[in-house]
Image (spheres, helix red, strand yellow):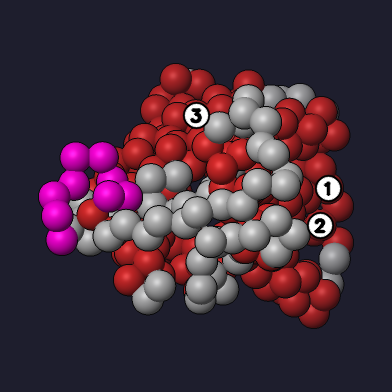
Amino acid sequence: MAPPGSLEHEEMAAIYQAEYPRTEIPVTDPFVVIELSAAHNLPGSTPGAPRHQGLWRRWWVSVTLGELLGFAAPAMVATLVRDAAPASAALALLLAGAIEGTVLGWFQARVLRTVVHGLRSGDWILATALGALLAWSIGVIPVAADDSLASVPPALLIPAAVVGGTIMLLSIGLTQWSVLRHRLHHAGQWIWATALAWLAGLACFTAFTTPLWQPGQSSLRIVSIGLVGGLLMAAIMSAVTGAFLVRILRAQ
């Protein structure tokens, strides 16, 4: 029983409102909390089945597709603005990066809502979009700076690149953690899991695309190479984050 005015009542009201946003919740009525086994958390689950059963596969499929579709925006924009003014190119890439984060967040949220009680899809999508925007804000600096970075001494450029790269890797995990920390124990692991996942994914993307991209190639070829690299990046990123998600949920 969660009486009115208690912390439990506020938590139950928030969860109920998230599931039924159009329903008015009386603030003076108590909530009766009925705990069910984890098998009831997933549609079609069998008695005794853990709530993370099949989660890694569902996460990998959904998030790989989501990141691939989202990454298509900056991949195509980068090709279209390669001859544009640096400031215009940087602004276009920032917008495309925000689109990537929004699409990725939506595909992630549709899986997370089945295993994380009370998670609001809108909160997760916004957090992911902001994290992606922060990462791309660092990533477009060389584009906006154009050739001016060539005059920066290596003693300054290398540490700045390390700091910037660290922020890029941590950005999405940090913003998503701000949502997960209210719902899961050990949510801090998500920050490092996401950073590791993006590091592995970006390393694979770079290893695949760098030898294939050559000067004078057509826009179609450039985009095609980028999308295949993006698929590899998405598959690796989703595989790593999915494994850590299952691990975090098992620790609840």
Does residue 128 appear to the left or right of 144 in the view shown?
left
Helix, strand or loop at disc 1? helix
Picture quadrant where residue 77 is located: top right
The amino acid on which the numbered mark 1 sits, given as a three-letter code, is Ala
* Above or below: residue 75 compared with residue 34: above
Label 3 CA crowd tier, 10 Å (few <14, some 14–19, many 20+) = many
Q: Which disc, if any, is residue 132?
A: none
Mark 2 and mark 1: span between their CA atoms?
Answer: 6 Å
Name the residue carrying label 1: 145
| Residue at left offset 45%, top offset 30% | 69
The amino acid on which the numbered mark 2 sits, given as a three-letter code, is Leu
Name the residue carrying label 2: 149
Cβ–Cβ under 8 Å for marks 2 and 1: yes
Does residue 75 appear to the left or right of 143 in the view shown?
left
**Residue 42 among magenta residues:** yes
**Residue 43 among magenta residues:** yes
Mark 3 and mark 2: span between their CA atoms?
Answer: 28 Å
Residue 207, can we see it?
no
| Residue at left offset 72%, top offset 31% | 95
Helix, strand or loop at disc 2? helix
What is the magenta range? 40-48
The quadrant of the rendering that contains the C terminus is bottom left
Label 2 CA crowd tier, 10 Å (few <14, some 14–19, many 20+) = some
The amino acid on which the numbered mark 3 sits, given as a three-letter code, is Ala
